[in-house]
């Protein structure tokens, strides 16, 4: 056993030990945050267990009164839904360090404190339970999940039969008193998925053992033996440990048998990386009190499938960035639309499997912008088209098989798509809140996918109403509310795209049967009306009749657009026009250039440097091209890398 890193942690806000387990949860559930060569993990199973009891041949030190019950080797909870995919109610909680021998009252208080800490640490662990249908990690038929119970039982027997070095590694350097206390461990089986690039590395499975009372988490890699069965390896075993000494907290990384460590540079980095890079991140994460208000990335689809498809699409469409004719940054928009396409392809593939269908879904992308997403989805076999108010130069590069239309979209009776499976809103600006409405009124089987960016209400800009939320979080909640009011089960996911606005909202199914369409549409109309502060029709008022020729379940339910406008003090719209809300205006056809986007970047860089020099020292200087490029990135809030999130945020509206 060797310690490869140790760092002291300052905890001014008293977030430890709970913050340690929150940081561990990030490394267990989302290791790609620290290791950029990973795509993610698949959490397959979880159970409670205990270390085996070891009988000693000689005298042993007293450990206080015996517990009332001793759990057998590999024990799990006595009650609950069995083994394997068992998720105990009390997740592993923060409890650092081995504690000296104590009497009955102290032990009882210690157990109660441990339970309280387990409850406190429950929330950040295993968000999005593994094994749920349609979730990440489900349905990997080519990579079946092993039985965690048998794996752990075999490993426990090996510990009890003489593997005392490994047992000492589990009990923090052989603390004999801990061998007697059969305290609960939390055991997780996960598959680590590398990015599917040219340096191919197969997914690796490992068992993660979290010991709350000792403040340790141990990672046990698995390998196949000669019979094809999985077993725990003795190499590449490491431990992350929290300890406290003289009032100061420490986090350490220890390796079991460092001479056997084999680094592949991807799943298993070098020990120096664990002791420096990973340890520094854990130390920072564990004292960050801010909790994210968003889900982890790719929580609704299989990460393994996404990794394969995303890599294939990147190779297939990477040359688009070299011939990009628009003034927008190709490094951002090509990579973003490739990642979006990969996500939708997996989402739709899993939907076909759930529904038992083989025909590929058709779609319409409203506000399609550069049309690259439409082009990729069409090339991959999904019939569809894109509509945008303004034609782009890049449209001419796609060919006739990519259907793109230059047309303004106004939410009304004519803007319905009854034969379309999915409506897409990819940075659709003023159309974003209307897309769930259009999908709901097009047909009962129409679904939607939106990636909100700029903040628009049904008419005009969105106004934040809750100061406790960020504007972005508030807007996402607003679009979720729109989808729910329209009768959708709205799901949220976070994409892996080069953008600061990465959260998508998906409506795949309805909350009501087809027979309830009229009553739900009445609710939609009242909700839309309420967003502009207008009163709805008084109770008992006879609703306006449905205009002839309107689609079933369309805009003109019992309180359709006519009643809405009348309630607002306006004359009813004519059936031919069928507006759902007066005042909506599509974006202007003429492009408004902002942030000097049409100016040469070298020129922008020279101007920025000249102004900076004048402000700092009053001197003018000749500016090189490399300096101007750096200044351009700096002036746009970036760090010189075309994929930086700061730079991308400024490009959001340039689509």
Image (spheres, grey):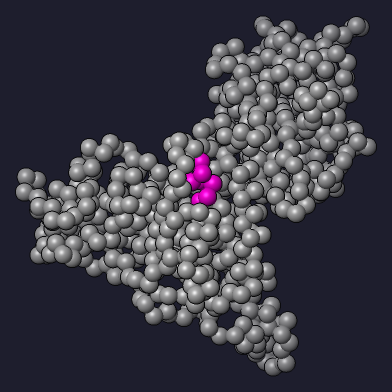
Query: Is residue 467 visible to us here?
Result: no
Q: What residue sits 66% from the left and 59% below the top? A: 315
- Is 369 above or below relative to 22? below
Q: What residue sits 57% from the left and 59% below the top? A: 338
Left or right, residue 303 beside residue 524: right
| Quarter assignment of residue 19 | top right
Q: Find the magenta span and give its range.
A: 344-351
- Is 155 above or below relative to 250? above
Picture coordinates of residue 62 (x, y %)?
82, 10
Which residue extends farthest front? 400
Residue 350 falls inside the magenta stretch: yes
Query: Is residue 37 visible to us here?
Result: yes
* Count of picture labels: 0
Left or right, residue 503 beside residue 616: left
| Quarter assignment of residue 65 | top right
Q: Nearer the viewer, residue 112 or 329?
A: 329
Picture coordinates of residue 223 (x, y %)?
79, 31
- Is 433 above or below relative to 21? below
Q: Quadrant of the N terminus?
A: top right
Residue 316 falls inside the magenta stretch: no
Which residue extends farthest right? 259
Left or right, residue 219 beside residue 379: right
- Is 503 above or below relative to 619? above
Q: What residue sits 58% from the left and 16% below the top? A: 82
Q: Nearer the viewer, residue 114 or 125?
A: 125
Q: Nearer the viewer, residue 347 or 183?
A: 347
- Please name the predominant secondary structure of the magenta segment in the image: helix
Picture coordinates of residue 509 (x, y %)?
37, 41
Picture coordinates of residue 43 (x, y %)?
63, 34
Q: What residue sits 21% from the left and 63% below the top? A: 579
């Amino acid at each position: 056993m060797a310690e490869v890193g140790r760092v002291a942690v300052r905890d001014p806000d008293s977030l430890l030990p709970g913050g340690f387990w929150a940081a561990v949860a990030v490394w267990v559930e989302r290791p790609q945050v620290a290791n950029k060569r990973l795509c993610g993990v698949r959490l397959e199973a979880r159970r409670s267990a205990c270390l085996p009891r070891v009988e000693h041949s000689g005298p042993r030190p007293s450990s206080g009164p015996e517990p009332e019950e001793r759990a057998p080797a590999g024990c799990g909870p006595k009650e609950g839904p069995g083994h394997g995919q068992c998720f105990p109610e009390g997740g592993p909680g923060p409890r650092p360090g081995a504690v000296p021998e104590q009497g009955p009252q102290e032990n009882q208080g210690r157990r109660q404190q441990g339970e309280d800490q387990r409850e406190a640490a429950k929330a950040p662990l295993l968000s999005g339970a593994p094994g749920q249908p349609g979730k990440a990690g489900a349905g990997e038929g080519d990579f079946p999940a092993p039985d965690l119970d048998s794996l752990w039982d075999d490993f426990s027997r090996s510990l009890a039969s003489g593997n005392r070095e490994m047992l000492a590694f589990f009990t923090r350097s052989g603390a004999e008193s801990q061998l007697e206390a059969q305290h609960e461990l939390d055991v997780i089986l996960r598959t680590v998925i590398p990015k599917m690039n040219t340096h191919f590395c197969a997914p690796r499975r490992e068992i993660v053992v979290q010991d709350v009372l000792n403040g340790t988490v141990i990672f046990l890699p698995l390998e196949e033996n000669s019979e094809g069965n999985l077993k725990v390896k003795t190499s590449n075993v490491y431990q992350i440990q929290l300890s406290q000494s003289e009032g100061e907290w420490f986090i350490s990384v220890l390796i079991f048998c460092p001479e056997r460590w084999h680094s592949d540079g991807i799943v298993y980095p070098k020990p120096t990386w664990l002791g420096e890079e990973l340890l520094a991140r854990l130390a920072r994460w564990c004292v960050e009190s801010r909790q994210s208000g968003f889900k982890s990335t790719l929580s609704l689809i299989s990460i393994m499938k996404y990794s394969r498809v995303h890599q294939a699409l990147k190779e297939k469409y990477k040359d688009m960035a070299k011939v990009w004719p628009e003034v927008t940054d190709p490094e951002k928009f090509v990579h973003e639309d490739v990642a979006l396409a990969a996500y939708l392809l997996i989402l739709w593939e899993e939907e076909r499997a759930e529904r038992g269908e083989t025909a590929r879904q058709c779609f319409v992308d409203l506000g399609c912008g550069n049309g690259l997403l439409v082009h990729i989805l069409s090339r991959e076999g999904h019939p569809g088209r894109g509509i945008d108010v303004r034609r782009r130069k890049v449209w001419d590069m796609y060919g006739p098989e990519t259907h793109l239309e230059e047309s303004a979209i106004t939410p009304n009776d004519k803007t319905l798509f009854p034969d379309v499976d999915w409506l897409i809103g990819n940075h659709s600006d003023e159309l974003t809140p209307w897309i769930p409405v259009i999908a709901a009124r097009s047909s009962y089987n129409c679904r939607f996918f939106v990636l909100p960016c700029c903040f628009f209400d049904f008419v005009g800009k969105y106004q934040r109403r809750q100061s406790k939320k960020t504007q972005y979080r508030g807007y996402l909640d607003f679009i979720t509310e729109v989808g729910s009011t329209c009768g959708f089960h709205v799901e949220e996911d976070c994409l892996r795209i080069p953008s600061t606005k990465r959260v998508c909202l998906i409506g795949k199914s309805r909350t009501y049967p087809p027979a309830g369409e009229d009553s739900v549409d009445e609710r939609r109309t009242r909700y839309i009306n309420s967003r502009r502060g207008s009163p709805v029709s008084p109770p008992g008022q006879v609703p306006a009749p449905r205009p002839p020729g309107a689609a079933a379940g369309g805009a003109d339910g019992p309180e359709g657009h006519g009643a809405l406008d009348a309630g607002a003090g306006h004359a009813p719209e004519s059936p031919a026009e069928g507006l759902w809300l007066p005042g909506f205006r599509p974006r202007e056809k003429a492009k408004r250039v902002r942030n000097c986007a049409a100016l040469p970047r070298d020129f922008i860089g020279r101007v920025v440097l000249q102004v900076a020099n004048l402000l700092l020292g009053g001197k003018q200087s000749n500016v090189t091209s490399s300096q101007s490029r750096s200044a351009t990135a700096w002036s746009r809030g970036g760090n010189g890398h075309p994929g930086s999130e700061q730079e991308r945020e400024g490009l959001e509206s340039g689509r």
